[in-house]
Amino acid sequence: MSSFLQIPAAPPLSTFARWPEERLKASREEALKQWRNTEDVWVFGYGSLIWKPEFDFIEQRPATLPGHHRALCLWSRINRGTPELPGLVFGLEAGGECHGMAFRLAANTVAPIFETLWRREMATGAYHPSWIDCQTKDGTVKALAFVIDQAGPAYVSEPPEDALIEIVLRASGIYGSCLEYVTQTADALEAVGIHDVRLTALVTRLKIKLQQGQHTLS
């Protein structure tokens, strides 16, 4: 690793804690407080939900979420990294806009899907579940989006690109490498016609580093 790289230090592992079932349930119920159980629900995907939603849906549409952008701003100590070498995964930060995918869930599937979705996305309370209007070619839909909690212990302001590349290339966890996560997200976006210029540029630099033999992945 080059000495000039300033990689932000992740907070101590002791600051992370999984939410108990009661807290997950309360958060989920709060998010669904105004939902009528005869209504379908939309969920906005901007990272791994695009290529691995792990739930059944009856419709999907490319969608633009205004006022937020996709950023590698959440430390991952298990899924895409380790406590010693944490990786980074995507979150939604304020500012700009984010192009992703909106999934429509049938009303009779919302409750069981949200229970599973909460265990996946809210295990440590890293996000604020938020209902935000998304723009699609077929009109505006109000979708649930997982917005990063900037006060949470796992949040980090997205590092400069050189440091970001170093983090992505070195980290790997139980679900695979951080590099795989980033490139799968970029590929999934391109596959549905969504062009994230910043992400594409990052992936290009990551591939160049690998081709130059500056990193090897385990």
Image (cartoon, grey):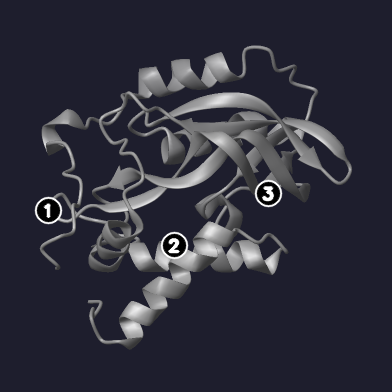
Measured Cα–Cα span from mark 2 to mark 3: 16 Å
Residue denoted by label 3:
101
Residue under the point 66% across and 27% down: 132
Give SS at disc 3: strand
Hey, which quadrant is residue 186 in on the image?
bottom right
Measured Cα–Cα span from mark 2 to mark 1: 20 Å
Q: Measuring from the top left, give residue 7's x and y in whole percent.
A: 20, 52
Measured Cα–Cα span from mark 1 to mark 3: 33 Å
Residue under the point 52% across and 26% down: 129
Q: Earlier in the sequence, mark 2 or mark 1?
A: 1
Q: Is residue 63 above or below residue 95?
A: below
Q: Measuring from the top left, give residue 187's x and y in whole percent.
A: 57, 69
Instruction: Give amino acid for label 1.
Output: Glu
- Number of other residues with Cα within 10 Å of mark 2, as a class: few under 14, some 14 to 19, many 20 or more: many
Residue denoted by label 1:
84
Give SS at disc 1: loop
